[in-house]
Image: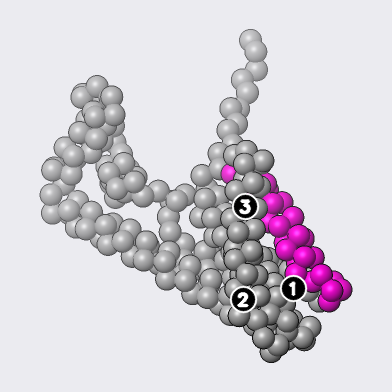
């Protein structure tokens, strides 16, 4: 007889939370810092002022990303926890109705009614709240909101992203500084988009293109504003 082999599957859904926060943070770190530095450079500022603006943008942006991500994801967690509390209360007060509701969910998904009832009974006996959270509310442990994880991922990735254009600003020649920052930042962003798409299982070319396009637009508009209203700082 052939020896049985373990079936192995690799899914990416468990990456959704931290990947979204990390990609958003890194992308925003590069775009906002590069745009800020390019805008200040286009205004004719001294090299020291350009670097100071970049450092301030890095620190302020990282803290803003962490706070915003924490509040946003915590709001999602609050909704999930409220739904779970309500479901727990309903299970205590009306267990028979909740069992019929769970059975109906499985029937609606295509399970034969008698079997659906058996499945609902067994899952209720094993973990009633978990069954209702997953199959009625759509809340699973893999995709639960994690505010602290999202905040740390956003802040760290923003700072890492912001260091790239800031490093270019520190070492690139003053003449043509905006060109150097814009060009290398777009290269960083395209690479980030490609990597994020690859990790998420999407097209690397499409991921790189969409990030580069919107980032180039942001830097171009910021440079135009800096040149339009520019005075030596």
Does 228 sit left or right of 176 as displayed?
left
- Whichever of labels 1 and 2 marks the residue nearer the N terminus, that label is 1
Whole-Å distance between the Cαs marked 3 and 2?
A: 23 Å
Q: Which residues are magenta?
A: 171-200
Q: Position of residue 121 (x, y in %)?
A: 24, 36
Whole-Å distance between the Cαs marked 1 and 2?
A: 23 Å
- Whichever of labels 3 and 2 marks the residue nearer the N terminus, that label is 3
Which mark is in front, 1 or 2?
A: 2
Q: Is residue 124 above or below residue 150?
A: above
Disc 3, SS: helix
Q: Position of residue 201 (x, y in %)?
A: 60, 39
Disc 1, SS: helix
Which residue was labeled with disc 2? 228
Q: Residues within 10 Å of mark 2 (few under 14, many from 20)?
A: few
Q: Residues within 10 Å of mark 3 (few under 14, many from 20)?
A: few
- Whichever of labels 1 and 3 marks the residue nearer the N terminus, that label is 1
Residue 199 on the magenta span: yes
Q: Is residue 229 above or below residue 68?
A: below
Residue 49 location, quadrant: bottom right
Farthest residue toward the bottom?
Answer: 233
Q: Residue at x 42, y 66 (%)?
A: 72
Q: Position of residue 172 (x, y in %)?
A: 85, 71
Whole-Å distance between the Cαs marked 1 and 3?
A: 21 Å
Res 29 visible: no
Q: Can you say which quadrant of the picture contains the N terminus?
A: top right
Q: Position of residue 192 (x, y in %)?
A: 68, 53
Farthest residue toward the front?
Answer: 228
> Foreground: 152 or 209?
209
Residue 129 on the magenta span: no
Which residue was labeled with disc 3? 213
> Foreground: 147 or 191?
191
Which residue was labeled with disc 1? 166
């Amino acid at each position: 007889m052939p020896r049985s082999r373990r079936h192995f599957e690799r899914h990416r859904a468990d990456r959704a939370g931290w990947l979204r926060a990390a990609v958003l943070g890194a992308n925003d770190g590069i775009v906002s810092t590069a745009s800020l530095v390019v805008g200040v450079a286009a205004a004719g500022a001294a090299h020291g002022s350009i670097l100071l603006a970049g450092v301030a943008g890095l620190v302020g942006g990282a803290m803003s990303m962490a706070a915003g991500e924490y509040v946003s994801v915590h709001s999602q967690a609050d909704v999930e926890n409220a739904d779970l509390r309500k479901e727990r209360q309903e299970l205590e007060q009306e267990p028979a109705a909740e069992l019929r509701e769970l059975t109906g969910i499985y029937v609606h998904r295509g399970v034969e009614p008698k079997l659906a009832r058996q499945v609902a009974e067994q899952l209720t006996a094993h973990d009633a709240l978990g069954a209702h959270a997953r199959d009625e509310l759509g809340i699973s442990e893999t995709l639960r909101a994690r505010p602290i994880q999202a905040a740390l991922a956003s802040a760290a990735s923003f700072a890492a992203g912001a260091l790239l254009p800031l490093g270019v600003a520190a070492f690139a020649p003053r003449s043509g500084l905006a060109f150097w920052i814009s060009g290398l930042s777009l290269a960083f962003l395209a690479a980030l988009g490609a990597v994020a798409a690859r990790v998420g299982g999407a097209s690397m070319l499409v991921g790189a293109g969409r990030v580069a396009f919107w980032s180039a637009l942001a830097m171009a508009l910021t440079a135009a504003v800096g040149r339009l209203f520019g005075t030596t700082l």
